[in-house]
Amino acid sequence: MLKRLLARTFWAFSRWTLVSEAAPTRPTVLVGAPHTSNWDFVLMLAIAWRLDIDVHWLGKKSLFRGWRGPIMRRLGGIPVDRSDPARVVKDVVGQVHDGTVFGLVVTPDGTRGGNEYWKSGFYRIARETGMPVTLGFVDRTTMTSGLGPTIDLTGDVGADMDRIRAFYADKAGVRPERRTEPRLREERPATTDPDAT
């Protein structure tokens, strides 16, 4: 109740406008992108709380040290060791199967920019748990933020990412200069048929 009140207050006074398709009704991996600023975290929490989505998010272990630990966990944080990405995915999959997570917020691109690829953890978690992916967004050009469609991944990485790229094509993030094109290393490069006319 308190979270929804805080979220309503935020959206009432914020310069940002919340726009959203229907909130997911089943466990989902909530992609937060383009992730170009730490303000994205505030916006994603405000979206989730306003739409009454029970969310968890992944954070580096250092964020949970000392007095910050209880606060971060209360906000839905799950501490992870980023030095071992494979274990991160395994740990999260285990927690999802245990019924721990409803909406798992993942930011596959980084705030610094200059990355050629998105991190593929969100894709592997969704595939290994059978969860769909909900596309959350921040777009400074329109000062809008919210949730886009919820999609089921097919396992065809290129085709799935084409759908994701199409959605984020006109989304700039808070700091557009740091935006990273949605692309995974696991995608196979396009091949050219020399006999094609």
Image: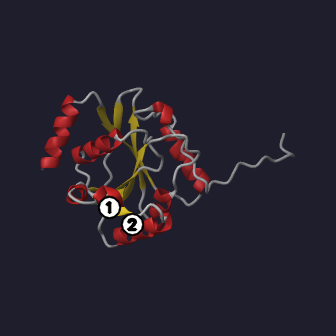
Residue that protrudes farthest toward the front in the picture: 66
User: How busy is the neighbourhood of tag 1: few (under 14 within 10 Å), some, or many (20 plus)?
Assistant: many
| Residue 27 visible to the viewer | no
Q: Which residue is mark 1?
A: 78
Picture quarter containing residue 182?
Answer: top right
Residue 86 position, x and y percent, is 50, 67
Which of these two is toward me, 82 or 35? 82
Residue 197 position, x and y percent, is 84, 39
Helix, strand or loop under label 2: helix
8 relative to 99 in the view: left or right:
left
Q: Amino acid at mark 2?
A: Val
Camera-side mark, 1 or 2: 1
Q: Amino acid at mark 1?
A: Ile
Q: Are marks 1 and 2 in contact (CB under 8 Å)?
A: yes
Which of these two is toward me, 51 or 39? 39
| Residue pictured at 40% horizontal, 69% vertical | 91
Helix, strand or loop under label 1: strand
| Residue pictured at 25% horizontal, 42% vertical | 46
User: How busy is the neighbourhood of tag 2: few (under 14 within 10 Å), some, or many (20 plus)?
Assistant: many
Residue 62 position, x and y percent, is 34, 58
Q: Which residue is mark 2?
A: 92
